[in-house]
Amino acid sequence: MNPSDREPLPPPDRTPKHDDVSTAADLALLDAYSRAVVSTLEQTRAGVVSLRVQARRGQGAGSGFLITPDGYLLTNSHVVDAGDAISVTLDDGKGYEATRVGADVDTDLALLRIGSATPLPHLRLGESKHLRVGQVVIAIGNPQGLSHTVTTGVVSALGRSLRARNGRLIEGVIQTDASLNPGNSGGPLLDTRAQVVGVNTAIIAGAQSLCFAVPADTARWVVGELLRHGRVRRAWLGVKAQTVPLPRRTVLHHGLDVASAVGVDEVLADGPAQRAGVRAGDRIFGVDGLPTPDVDTLNRVLGGERIDRSVRVDLLRGVDKLSLSLVPAARS
């Protein structure tokens, strides 16, 4: 056959194959993710510090981050509560001695300050109330003494409750799978806008990627209290109590919204509850119309804004429902 009689070959198929499209999309996603992490790190790492705590029983270490240019920094209370001397090292290697401004063991937060002749790089506290499950978060800290280690993950859950070391409940805790290890405590949990959304505080030993952070909204409130008063003020009733179930008949009879209440075991002498007429055996089920089905909820409701203000305490005394006017004091 004459070569000129052959039919021309079809043009090559340049339509992207499915595998090629998937690979390009994966690379684009990876690049966007990497850019977000790198950008956040570049904007924030200078404000993250490592802490060395000297105590009588030995040394400890942890993380922290500056929140003002004049040297105020946040960390965990449990990192510094037993320390006699606290040294702070910045990303550039400069060292400082820190002084305590105040601490709040109920939220496991502590505020320190270092002195500097020039403004210091610092981080911005974001609003943790806008977080969403699945959102990318970035943790920076000093696990096992490895300074400025970066781990990433997502917000695994919101609104968790976590016991502080004094037994009280920290509300609204952020759960994340961004890996944390001993030494990360007190470091920042960041979003991809380079804002602090949480303060890394705890892991569950032996578990995989179950890590927790105190929300930035809580941290902002604690900082304000420590700066104004040197401590976090909480209202106090002057009772010893425990959570008790309520008989279903009582709940239905009074039309209550709770199935349990705060049972008063003891009323402390000359405390707000005694002055208001609260008695041992009473069961408190509400404060200012807010249900208090357990002791933890009662502690949460009794915020600093109720100190020295008259509040309404709803309770059961035997089968009777009563409301008393009570003025909480500041908890010492």
Image (tube, helix red, strand yellow):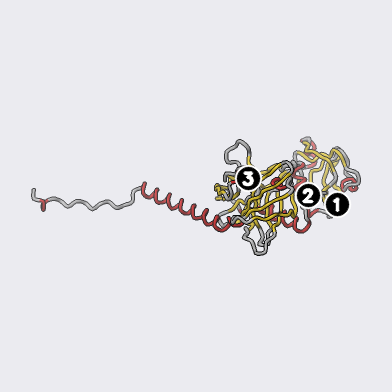
Q: Is residue 79 visible?
A: yes
The answer to whether residue 290 is above or below residue 259 is below
Q: Kindly report the distance in space between the C-alpha atoms of the residues bearing marks 1 and 2.
A: 11 Å
Q: Nearer the viewer, residue 153 or 242?
A: 153
Q: Nearer the viewer, residue 186 or 323?
A: 186
Q: Residue at x 59, y 45 (%)?
A: 176
Task: Residue type at mark 3: give it.
Answer: Gly
Crowd class of label 1 (few under 14; some 14 to 19; many from 20; radius 10 Å) = many
Q: Circle 3 is placed at which residue position?
A: 183
Task: Residue type at mark 1: give it.
Answer: Val
Q: Are marks 1 and 2 in contact (CB under 8 Å)?
A: no
Q: Residue at x 33, y 51 (%)?
A: 16
Q: Residue at x 54, y 57 (%)?
A: 42
Residue 282 percent coordinates (x, y): 85, 40
Q: Circle 1 is placed at which residue position?
A: 327
Q: Kindly report the distance in space between the C-alpha atoms of the residues bearing marks 3 and 2.
A: 33 Å
Which residue in the rendered view is the most extreme toward the bottom?
118
Task: Residue type at mark 2: give it.
Answer: Leu
Q: Earlier in the sequence, mark 1 or mark 2?
A: 2
Q: Circle 2 is placed at which residue position?
A: 302
Q: Is residue 263 left or right of residue 155?
A: right
